[in-house]
Amino acid sequence: MRLVQIAQHASDLPRAAEFYAALLGAEPRAVFDPPGLLFFDLDGVRLLLESGAPSALVYLAVADVRDLVARLRSRGVEIVAEPNVIFSHPDDRLGPAGTDEWMAFIRDSEGNTVGLVSQLPH
């Protein structure tokens, strides 16, 4: 079994499309409006943004959460929680051994919280 799709609430599709295109560095894969569906591809998993979806807490892997948060802050994105190490990986059960897991949280254009995660060398 594998994850196919994640749905996230978006009350304003054009605004959400602009926010997520900038965050992900990619344009939407498909837009169906009506009925109000917007899709992005997250490495083979669809991110569906739609007004009828509940808010979800989505965690996105990013190269370096510290750098990305600085860039997002300069664009006026609300930072909910600053980057910090939440876990060190002594083995490879949950991430590459010898790395620290950094995490930060931002608020998207629709009021949802989004987690940003990097696994960086100690």
Image: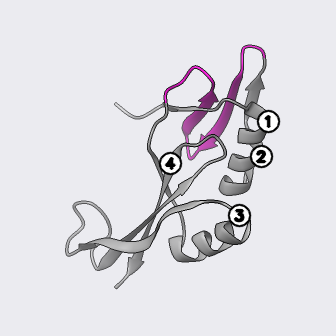
Pointer 2 residue: 18
Looking at the rendering, which quadrant does residue 42 occupy?
Answer: top right
Query: Given contact means CB atoms under 8 Å apart, are the residues at marks 4 and 1 in contact?
Result: no
Inspect the magenta stretch and tell me whether residue 38 lies in it.
Answer: yes
Question: What amino acid type should be assigned to the residue bearing mark 4?
Answer: Thr
Pointer 4 residue: 113
Residue 78 horizontal side relative to residue 91, left or right: right
Asked if 70 appears above or below 16 in the picture, the reply is below
Report x, y in % for residue 99: 33, 77
Question: What amino acid type should be assigned to the residue bearing mark 3?
Answer: Gly
What span is colored magenta in the figure?
34-54
Residue 93 horizontal side relative to residue 59, left or right: left
Which label lies toward us, 3 or 1?
3
Report x, y in % for residue 122: 34, 85
Q: CA distance from mark 4 to mark 3?
A: 15 Å
Packing grade of label 3 (10 A; few <14, some 14-19, many >=20) is few
Please, what secondary structure does the residue beneath circle 4 have?
A: strand
Residue at the spot 24% in from the left edge and 66% down from the top edge: 92
Sequence-wise first label, 4 or 3: 3
Residue at the spot 66% in from the left edge and 60% down from the top edge: 77
Question: What amino acid type should be assigned to the residue bearing mark 1?
Answer: Pro
Report x, y in % for residue 40: 66, 39
Q: CA distance from mark 3 to mark 2?
A: 14 Å
Please, what secondary structure does the residue beneath circle 2 have?
A: helix
Q: CA distance from mark 3 to mark 1?
A: 18 Å
In the rendered view of the protein, which quadrant contains the N terminus? top left
Query: Given contact means CB atoms under 8 Å apart, are the residues at marks 2 and 1 in contact?
Result: yes
